[in-house]
Image (tube, rainbow, N blue to C red):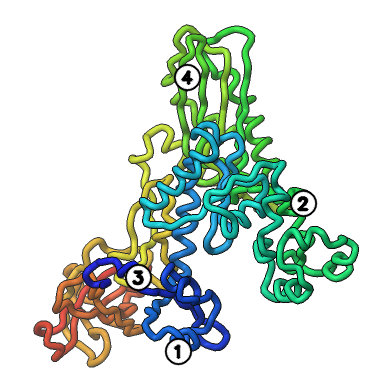
Amino acid sequence: MERHNTAPPDDLAIVLTCEGQHGPVIHAVNRPARLARVNVGARVVDVKAACPDLRVEYADLAGDEIALNRLMLWARRWCPWTVVDGADGLILDTTGADHLLGGEATMLIEMEQRLSLLGLTSRVAVAPTWGAAWALARYGPVRAICPPAQLAAQLAPLPVSALRLDEATLILLRRLGLKTIGALADVPRLSLTRRFARETLRANPLLRLDQAMGHLAEPVASKETRPRIKAQAQLAEPIQDPTAYLPDLCEDLCNRLTHHGLGCRRLSLSVYRTDGEVSTITAAITAPSRDPVHLSRLFDDKLERIKPGFGFDLITLEAETVEQIAIVQNRFDGGSDEELHLSQLIDRLVARLGERSVKRPVRLASHLPERAEGMAGALSDAQGMIATLTRERPIRLLSSPEEVRVVYAVPEGPPAQFIWRRQTHTVARYVGPERIAPEWWKDRPGTRLRDYFKIEDQLGKRLWLYREGLHGDGRGGTPRWFVHGMFA
């Protein structure tokens, strides 16, 4: 069915498995498998004996995690605060956002519809706390909505497994006859505290109950959310030029960045005109910075692009993109020579010439020398394509290898004498060979391999020489020799 890209039948029981302590265990099940009483966590060999028609597939745990993180960002269409909850859940803080979607009931229906269009089956619920929403979504009625006044009443009939406890604690509670949240809440806290006071959160039913009831805070805080860092200047009268206020704004912004331990990569300067319009200019930075003088100079040639209209009475400077930055000591007195940083020169060139006009070389993930280097924008994030240099390479690499004429060759070694650029070179010493095979996923069939040698001639000149091909390799005639670079 995978080859024909067709979905399996709706009545076919399918499970996803992952490795357990004693072999593969069930990780997830579909509806037919759940109706056949196939439980998550059971061993595959035991389940196959009771359900021989069960279809077993391996779970892609890493792919599921990536997909869930992407779904978490996608869910921010309903509210600005979303986080991943375990391996199969999302928590959305919709406080103050549900009325924009027609109310809580309409919002839940829209969530189910949009998720179904993505091919996902969902169970949604609204509750005042994280723990209550988790419990009602998994053990409560369809599209449950729990007002704060009914929190205890709606959670009381749910099983204790709705409190996000580990399996050992659930077994213990069932042996004590505490099968529902209501029964657990009726037990005197002192007796339970003596038993579970030193347990962790997942093994402490009192803490989980307090989280569900709202007595213990469990806020929804997105990990990706950065503090909004902005400096502003409110003016008594409208003006036409913000130049005089820019140094103070940069100083204020950098103080805020220092307080949060961050550096700015992109910032925007906005002026709010008296006619209601907003004019904005931006500047990008190569490396995170919080130097007010440097940030101010990035706008030297850009302030003229602001359209002041009849004047503006509010100026804001905001750090749009921020990153963690560490204080680097490069002087014996404990200071840092920020004025000597190369990134500041690059930033000024980009501000004057434009982002497309300034490039920088980067190492690429290729073992062929001519493909191991490329050009990237000065402000682009090329970390993903940078490769680690593992072998010594010449300080100068020719753009195109130059063929040499061999006068006398040594078997399995470099030529003893060769002519290059109309000069005869005699090999005094050499190191090698270093064999570099062609990249079969890029090169054409029949491309010959290379044997590189570091050689030094009679005058002390060090060259990087390679032989293309081998005798009898079936990919051409006599091997050819080339100079590819110079070491000194």
* Left or right of residue 475: residue 233: right
Establish if 190 lies above or below 223: below
Can you tell which quarter of the image residue 260 is in?
top right
Q: Residues within 10 Å of mark 4 (few under 14, many from 20)?
A: some
Which residue is rendered at x = 21% and y = 64% of the image? 400
Please state which of residues 436 and 395 is positioned toward the viewer in this rendering. 436
Circle 2 crowding by C-alpha within 10 Å: few under 14, some 14–19, many from 20 = few
- Under mark 4, the amino acid is Val
User: Residue beneath label 3, please?
Assistant: 11
Q: Earlier in the sequence, mark 1 or mark 2?
A: 1
Q: Amino acid at mark 3?
A: Asp
Discs 3/4, front: 3
Looking at the picture, tell me which residue is in the foreground, 444 or 461.
Answer: 444
Q: Amino acid at mark 2?
A: Leu
Q: Amino acid at mark 1?
A: Ala
Distance between mark 1 and mark 2 Cα atoms: 45 Å
Task: Give me the residue at 66% from left, 66% from top.
Answer: 161
Residue at 43%, 45% (x, y): give it: 379
Q: CA distance from mark 2 to mark 3?
A: 43 Å
- Marks 2, 3: nearer the viewer: 3
Q: Which mark is residue 278?
A: 4
Q: Secondary structure at mark 4?
A: strand
Disc 1 crowd rating (10 Å Cα; few below 14, some 14-19, many 20+) is few
| Tag of residue 49 | 1
- Please state, as top left, top right, bottom left or bottom right, where the C terminus lies in the image: bottom left
**Mark 1 → mark 4, Cα distance in angstroms:** 70 Å
431 to 355, vertically: above or below: below
